[in-house]
Amino acid sequence: MPEYTRPSRVAIVGTGLVGATFAYALMITGMVSEIVLIDANRERAHGEAMDLNHGLPFVRPVRIWDCDYAECAEADVIVIAAGAAQRPGQTRLELVQRNVSILRDIIAQVTRHASRERSILLIVSNPVDILAYAAWKLSGWPAGRVIGSGTVLDTARFRHLLGQYFQVDPRSVHAYIIGEHGDSEVPLWSSANIGGIPLTEFENWDRAAMDDIFAQTRDAAYAIIQAKGATYYAIGLALVRIVEAILHDQRSVLSVSTLMNGDYGLRDVYLSLPAVVGRRGVERVLDLPLSQEEVVGLHRSAGVLRETIAQVEII
């Protein structure tokens, strides 16, 4: 596949733990030419830029600076990581109205300067499916160019735990979490495999163990937040992976959150399904052969998201 080689810029809106960790991980890769940091607290953004710049002698050259929204004009990807943090015991969906209000102001600023022909909006703030839908509505941009990080992280957690159980490299585990990035998410057991071999054909496969692995996947954020207050390392790396697929036009299959246009009978809702991601954003959603139980779970997850959207003032 051809690589996206011209000078590239990633703008990060929100320099809290997730935004700053993503900036650090992105800097280490040497993937981009420029990283710009935007935050309502300009002093915070300036401090993060200083700290990152002091590490530049150890990595490949990259320009990093704090700025205002005008610098989004030349951005290839604009990552929105700003928003209220999830508190211990709080669900992602309970964050929604507060973060939609924050997002409304951000999108107004971004779209004033950024180009819908050049830029991709990548939403990571929670609840990500609702906020990605809101960003699409508020921006007026094509849905394929407004992406949520979705269940890319949940899928990574799932593969890690399955790899640990079956004692194989998690990169050799092919399994997805779909639906909401949250409590109603759905594991795709029917297509889960290791090296092409269905999980059920491994001698140590056990239904109760699999159910426990999914529960650990679904509840991982709660456990981490309870233990240390926030999650940021793994999601920072997940964002790097999504940005890599976009900038290098890799057409990678990633479980990002995107608009449903009749997929599995679903419309007008953002949720996660394996999708082809490249320079134009989401190019298409794959039509996987889901089991009846998985289809029911996906529709239930969509229902949870639609119910929340109906209660939120977006426009």
Image (cartoon, rainbow, N blue to C red):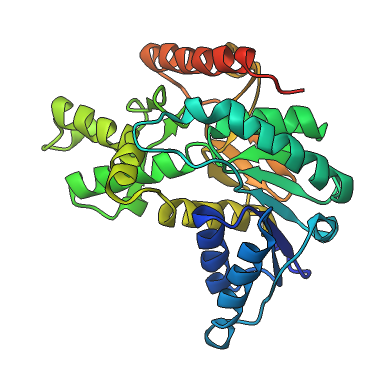
* Residue 40, x across and y down, in percent: 69, 53
- Please give the name of the residue rendered at 54% of the width and 40% of the height, measured from the top-left corner: 84
Q: Is residue 115 visible?
A: yes
* Residue 219, x across and y down, in percent: 31, 34
Between 144 and 197, the one lying in front of the other is 144
Between 151 and 15, the one lying in front of the other is 15
Between 297 and 26, the one lying in front of the other is 26
Q: Is residue 123 above or below residue 289?
A: below
* Residue 223, x across and y down, in percent: 28, 41
* Residue 37, x across and y down, in percent: 68, 62
Q: Is residue 264 visible?
A: no
Q: Is residue 102 above or below residue 68?
A: above
Q: Is residue 279 above or below residue 274?
A: below
The tally of labels here is 0
- Please give the name of the residue rendered at 31% of the width and 40% of the height, measured from the top-left corner: 220
Q: Would you say 205 lies left or right of 77 here?
A: left
- Please give the name of the residue rendered at 56% of the width and 27% of the height, measured from the top-left corner: 96
Q: Quadrant of residue 314?
A: top right
Between 275 and 302, the one lying in front of the other is 302
Q: Is residue 301 above or below residue 220?
A: above
Q: Would you say 130 lies left or right of 121 here?
A: left
- Quadrant in which the N terminus appears: bottom right
- Quadrant in which the C terminus appears: top right
- Please give the name of the residue rendered at 71% of the width and 53% of the height, measured from the top-left corner: 77
Q: Would you say 284 lies left or right of 114 here?
A: left
Question: Which residue occupies the extreme left position in the image?
Answer: 204
Q: Quadrant of residue 15?
A: bottom right
